[in-house]
Image (cartoon, rainbow, N blue to C red):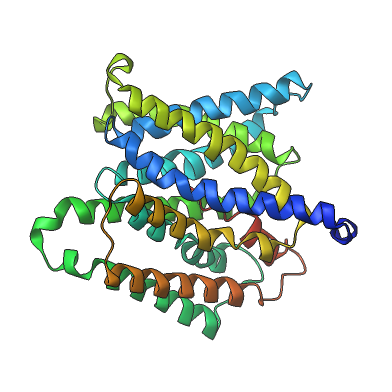
Amino acid sequence: MYDKSGLHSRRYLTSSYIAVALVSFFWGTTYPAIRIGVAHMPGLMLASIRQTLAGALLVLFYLLKGQGLPRLPEMGKLLIMGFLLLGASNGLLSWAEQYLPGGLAAILAATCPLAIVWFSIWFLPGAKFTRGLYLGMGLGLAGIVVIFSPEILHAHSHNFLLGAALILCSVITWAGGTVYTARHPLALPLLYVTGWQMLLGGISLMPLCVATGQFIPLQQIAPQAWWAIGYLIVFGSMIGYVAYVYAISTLPPAQVSIYAYINPLVAMAIGVWWLKESITLRTILGALITLCGVYLVQKSFKTVPPSKSGPSIPEIEIQEIRAHP
């Protein structure tokens, strides 16, 4: 996937590492940005507006460059990918942040690889369970229990647990979309595909916003929410994705994947500093256990031999884990 000959150039490497740093930082900041936005508008609606506008900009950019429209079968696949990856998944996460601090949301979202591996075991050829996978999944779940154990035992924490459940559903839809994407590759530029996923995912959320009551008239959206949406579009969807695509095309996937461990740390730090979110020793301990589990799962999964008749499992697992909100 990455160009080995370019790795010999220090200048080339520097720009690649800068891209990883941008992804690590800006995707981490999207969690507190969402938190700010949902303080003034419904989370599902925020996600719909963000993805629709960001997707429209990316698609328009490629159309102006002369890129042709996807064929009808490709459009159908893009609709499914968009709804699972950037519609339902991002929408549920944004909805959840109405009830959860951004740092905790980032920790839960970081468990995406656990769900992706589980789906991959059942739907991708060449993947299988190993001791490392079992141990990693166990650690990941144990970390979540450590973080949320007080809320599980107290009935008055209904909204808090609702937020956690929404993010876990978000993780499941993201994992399902990831495996579907791996099984149905498209011969289109990656950013162009991403643009369509954003656009179709955002549009598909609109009727759900109305059906669930996660909707307010546009004129009632506060300026703070529009600023949050603008930040998410520019730094999360545009700069973040461009940097990610550049990094994954110029560096080994294992090096790029480090962003998945930095994102929660950035989200927690900004949440404490900027939003005055509280953090406890239990939360830190649970986060470390969870991230250790995620690391072990990714490390163990990459050692599974790929199928001779199917795509490379390591390539699918790393390239498609874009665990950002």
In the rendered view, would you say 109 is above or below 305? Answer: above
Q: Residue at x 71, y 75 (%)?
A: 305
In the displayed structure image, the side of residue 69 where residue 225 appears, left or right: left
Q: Nearer the viewer, residue 325 or 166?
A: 325
Residue 43 in view: no
Q: Nearer the viewer, residue 263 or 303?
A: 263
Q: The N terminus lies in which quarter of the figure? A: bottom right
In the rendered view, would you say 101 is above or below 4? Answer: above
The answer to which quarter of the image holds residue 130 is bottom right
User: Picture coordinates of residue 86 (x, y %)?
Assistant: 49, 40
User: Picture coordinates of residue 183 (x, y %)?
Assistant: 64, 53
User: Picture coordinates of residue 41 (x, y %)?
Assistant: 29, 30
Q: How many marks?
A: 0
Extreme top residue here? Answer: 219
Q: Residue at x 62, y 71 (%)?
A: 127
The answer to which quarter of the image holds residue 39 is top left
Q: Residue at x 45, y 43 (%)?
A: 30
In the displayed structure image, the side of residue 103 where residue 241 appears, left or right: right
In the displayed structure image, the side of residue 310 where residue 317 appears, left or right: left
Residue 321 in view: yes
In the displayed structure image, the side of residue 303 where residue 213 appears, left or right: left
Extreme front residue here? Answer: 273
In the rendered view, would you say 123 is above or below 192? Answer: below
In the rendered view, would you say 182 is above or below 194? Answer: below
Q: Residue at x 31, y 21 (%)?
A: 221
Q: Nearer the viewer, residue 27 or 132?
A: 27
User: Picture coordinates of residue 208 (x, y %)?
Assistant: 34, 31
